[in-house]
Image (cartoon, helix red, strand yellow):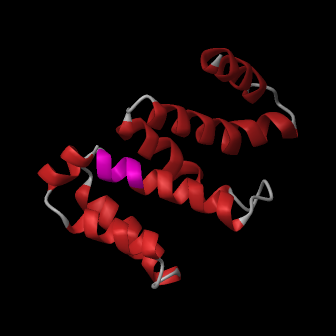
Amino acid sequence: EVEQMLRTWRDVAGDGNENGRWVRDIGLPLIEGFTAFWRRDYVTAVERLHAARHFGFAFGGSNAQRDIIGWTLTEAALRGGQGAFSRALVQERLALKPHSPVNRGLLARASASPALQRRAA
């Protein structure tokens, strides 16, 4: 079902209209990023989610929905062993929400050795 959904969205992304542009620029990168994360392809998940993470406002996403994008992106970077990038993402999150238990937990993991990060995945 995931493959069928991806094919459908990719077809729509090729349309030259506003809907096609939205799907190409926002919808498809998010779907591909979450699908890659689900498949444990963390490098692709990081690439796709990073490209679309600031577009949450464009589709009217709530703070919680935008957090899911950011958390998944950060988690993919951690699991993918992208230490410096994951630490940068965590620092961004901490700047916005310094008292967040989730962000503090991510910081602890991002500060751990790369070997520990891979084991946590």
Q: Is residue 104 left or right of residue 117?
A: right
Q: Is residue 83 left or right of residue 28?
A: left
Q: Quarter holding the N terminus?
A: top right
Which residue shows up at 67% across the image and 15% down it?
4
Most frequent secondary structure within the magenta stretch:
helix
Q: Quarter holding the C terminus?
A: top left
Toward the front, the furthest residue is: 101
Image: magenta residue range: 75-79
Vertical comparison of 16 with 88: above or below: above
- Residue 77 painted magenta: yes
Which residue shows up at 76% across the image and 57% down it?
58
Whole-percent x, y for residue 88 in the image: 35, 68
Q: Quadrant of residue 19?
A: top right
- Number of labelled discs? 0
In terms of depth relative to the viewer, which is nearer, 28 or 109?
109
Whole-percent x, y for residue 57 in the image: 74, 62
Vertical comparison of 23 with 75: above or below: above
Whole-percent x, y for residue 69 in the image: 57, 54
Vertical comparison of 55 with 101: above or below: above
Which residue shows up at 41% across the image and 57% down it?
74
Vertical comparison of 76 with 102: above or below: above
- Residue 35 painted magenta: no
Which residue shows up at 21% across the image and 68% down it?
111
Whole-percent x, y for residue 83 in the image: 24, 58
Q: Is residue 19 left or right of residue 6?
A: right
